[in-house]
Amino acid sequence: MAENIFLEVVTPSKAVVSEEAQIVVAPGSEGEFGVLKGHTTFLTSLKLGSLRYKDSSGQERVVFVSGGFAEVLPNKVTVLAESAERRKDIDVDRAKRAKDRAEKRLSSGSADIDFVRAEAALRRAIHRLSIKGVA
Protein backbone atom coordinates (compact mmCIF):
# COMPACT_ATOMS: atom_id res chain seq x y z
CA MET A 1 0.00 0.00 0.00
CA ALA A 2 1.23 3.50 -0.83
CA GLU A 3 2.25 5.89 1.89
CA ASN A 4 -0.07 8.66 3.03
CA ILE A 5 0.17 12.36 2.31
CA PHE A 6 -0.66 15.04 4.87
CA LEU A 7 -3.70 17.19 4.02
CA GLU A 8 -4.37 20.56 5.59
CA VAL A 9 -7.41 22.69 4.67
CA VAL A 10 -7.60 26.10 6.32
CA THR A 11 -9.75 29.21 5.96
CA PRO A 12 -9.08 32.69 7.32
CA SER A 13 -11.05 31.75 10.45
CA LYS A 14 -10.29 28.07 11.17
CA ALA A 15 -8.54 24.83 10.34
CA VAL A 16 -11.06 22.50 8.67
CA VAL A 17 -8.91 19.42 7.96
CA SER A 18 -5.53 18.41 9.33
CA GLU A 19 -4.92 14.70 8.80
CA GLU A 20 -3.23 12.06 6.71
CA ALA A 21 -4.86 10.98 3.45
CA GLN A 22 -4.25 8.22 0.93
CA ILE A 23 -5.30 10.45 -2.00
CA VAL A 24 -6.57 14.01 -2.42
CA VAL A 25 -8.70 15.18 -5.37
CA ALA A 26 -9.35 18.93 -5.62
CA PRO A 27 -11.18 21.35 -7.95
CA GLY A 28 -8.33 23.25 -9.57
CA SER A 29 -9.08 26.34 -11.63
CA GLU A 30 -7.87 24.50 -14.75
CA GLY A 31 -9.62 21.25 -13.86
CA GLU A 32 -9.77 18.64 -11.16
CA PHE A 33 -6.43 17.19 -10.01
CA GLY A 34 -5.42 14.26 -7.86
CA VAL A 35 -2.45 13.94 -5.53
CA LEU A 36 -0.67 10.94 -4.07
CA LYS A 37 2.45 10.90 -1.88
CA GLY A 38 5.51 11.86 -3.92
CA HIS A 39 3.62 14.17 -6.31
CA THR A 40 5.51 16.91 -8.12
CA THR A 41 5.44 20.28 -6.37
CA PHE A 42 3.01 22.87 -7.75
CA LEU A 43 0.75 25.76 -6.76
CA THR A 44 -2.71 26.36 -8.24
CA SER A 45 -5.82 28.38 -7.66
CA LEU A 46 -9.04 26.58 -6.80
CA LYS A 47 -12.58 27.04 -7.98
CA LEU A 48 -15.76 26.34 -6.08
CA GLY A 49 -16.24 22.62 -5.71
CA SER A 50 -15.73 19.44 -3.76
CA LEU A 51 -12.36 18.46 -2.37
CA ARG A 52 -12.45 14.69 -1.92
CA TYR A 53 -9.96 12.54 -0.09
CA LYS A 54 -9.57 9.11 1.40
CA ASP A 55 -8.47 9.27 5.00
CA SER A 56 -5.75 6.96 6.31
CA SER A 57 -8.32 4.19 6.90
CA GLY A 58 -9.67 4.43 3.32
CA GLN A 59 -12.92 6.24 4.21
CA GLU A 60 -13.92 8.81 1.57
CA ARG A 61 -14.38 12.34 2.92
CA VAL A 62 -15.76 15.42 1.16
CA VAL A 63 -15.08 19.09 1.89
CA PHE A 64 -16.86 22.00 0.21
CA VAL A 65 -14.34 24.64 -0.86
CA SER A 66 -15.12 28.05 -2.25
CA GLY A 67 -12.07 29.32 -4.07
CA GLY A 68 -8.57 29.74 -2.74
CA PHE A 69 -5.22 28.11 -3.46
CA ALA A 70 -3.60 24.71 -3.13
CA GLU A 71 0.09 24.05 -2.60
CA VAL A 72 1.20 20.53 -3.41
CA LEU A 73 4.47 19.20 -2.03
CA PRO A 74 5.71 15.61 -2.27
CA ASN A 75 4.44 14.83 1.24
CA LYS A 76 1.79 17.50 1.91
CA VAL A 77 -1.20 19.29 0.35
CA THR A 78 -2.11 22.64 1.86
CA VAL A 79 -5.38 24.27 0.83
CA LEU A 80 -5.97 27.91 1.71
CA ALA A 81 -9.68 28.34 0.99
CA GLU A 82 -11.92 31.39 1.13
CA SER A 83 -14.44 29.12 2.86
CA ALA A 84 -14.55 25.38 3.52
CA GLU A 85 -16.89 22.96 5.26
CA ARG A 86 -16.77 19.22 5.80
CA ARG A 87 -19.82 17.44 4.38
CA LYS A 88 -20.97 16.56 7.89
CA ASP A 89 -20.87 20.25 8.95
CA ILE A 90 -23.00 21.64 6.10
CA ASP A 91 -26.27 23.06 7.44
CA VAL A 92 -28.91 22.05 4.86
CA ASP A 93 -31.55 24.51 6.14
CA ARG A 94 -29.07 27.39 5.99
CA ALA A 95 -28.02 26.42 2.46
CA LYS A 96 -31.67 26.23 1.35
CA ARG A 97 -32.35 29.70 2.80
CA ALA A 98 -29.25 31.08 1.04
CA LYS A 99 -30.41 29.51 -2.23
CA ASP A 100 -33.89 31.01 -1.87
CA ARG A 101 -32.46 34.49 -1.08
CA ALA A 102 -30.14 34.38 -4.07
CA GLU A 103 -32.90 33.22 -6.42
CA LYS A 104 -35.19 36.03 -5.21
CA ARG A 105 -32.46 38.61 -5.73
CA LEU A 106 -31.73 37.35 -9.23
CA SER A 107 -35.40 37.25 -10.24
CA SER A 108 -36.24 40.67 -8.77
CA GLY A 109 -34.85 42.57 -11.76
CA SER A 110 -33.90 45.44 -9.46
CA ALA A 111 -31.09 47.70 -10.63
CA ASP A 112 -29.72 47.75 -7.06
CA ILE A 113 -28.85 44.04 -7.08
CA ASP A 114 -25.24 42.95 -7.42
CA PHE A 115 -25.89 40.09 -9.85
CA VAL A 116 -22.33 38.73 -9.69
CA ARG A 117 -22.54 38.33 -5.89
CA ALA A 118 -26.05 36.87 -6.08
CA GLU A 119 -25.00 34.33 -8.73
CA ALA A 120 -21.95 33.36 -6.66
CA ALA A 121 -24.13 32.91 -3.56
CA LEU A 122 -26.53 30.76 -5.57
CA ARG A 123 -23.69 28.55 -6.89
CA ARG A 124 -22.29 28.09 -3.35
CA ALA A 125 -25.70 27.15 -1.94
CA ILE A 126 -26.46 24.72 -4.77
CA HIS A 127 -23.07 23.02 -4.40
CA ARG A 128 -23.44 22.68 -0.63
CA LEU A 129 -26.84 21.07 -1.14
CA SER A 130 -25.49 18.71 -3.81
CA ILE A 131 -22.71 17.57 -1.45
CA LYS A 132 -25.37 16.69 1.12
CA GLY A 133 -27.40 14.87 -1.54
CA VAL A 134 -30.23 17.42 -1.51
CA ALA A 135 -31.19 18.91 -4.85
Image (cartoon, rainbow, N blue to C red):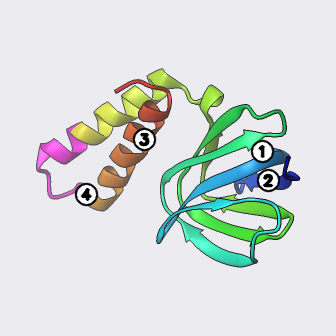
Up-down: is 17 above or below 75?
Answer: above
Tell me which amino acid carries mark 3.
His
Residue 111 highlighted magenta (yes or no): yes
Residue denoted by label 1: 17
The location of residue 69, given as percent across then percent down, is: 63, 68
Q: Secondary structure at mark 4?
A: helix
Which of label 4 and label 1 is nearer to you? 1
Of the numbered discs 2 and 3, the one sitting upstream in the chain is 2
Circle 2 residue: 7
Asked whether 44 or 103 is in front, the reply is 44
Mark carried by residue 115: 4
| Residue 43 place in picture, x, y as percent | 67, 76
Residue under numbered circle 3 = 127
Amino acid found under the numbered disc labelled 4: Phe
Q: Nearer the viewer, mark 2 or mark 3?
A: 2
Considering the numbered disc 2 on the image, is that residue within a helix, a strand or a loop?
strand
Boundaries of the magenta span = 104-115
Q: Residues within 10 Å of mark 4 (few under 14, many from 20)?
A: some
Q: Is label 4 in contact with label 3 (beta carbons under 8 Å)? A: no
Name which residue lies at 24% across and 54% down: 113
1 vs 2, front mark: 2
**Cα distance in 3D space between marks 4 and 1:** 32 Å
Quadrant hosting residue 26: bottom right
In space, the residues marked 1 and 2 are separated at their CA atoms by 7 Å
Task: Give me the C-alpha separation between circle 3 and circle 1.
Answer: 19 Å
**Residue under the point 25% across and 57% down:** 115
Alpha carbon distance from label 2 to label 4: 35 Å
- Name the residue type under label 2: Leu
Q: Earlier in the sequence, mark 4 or mark 1?
A: 1
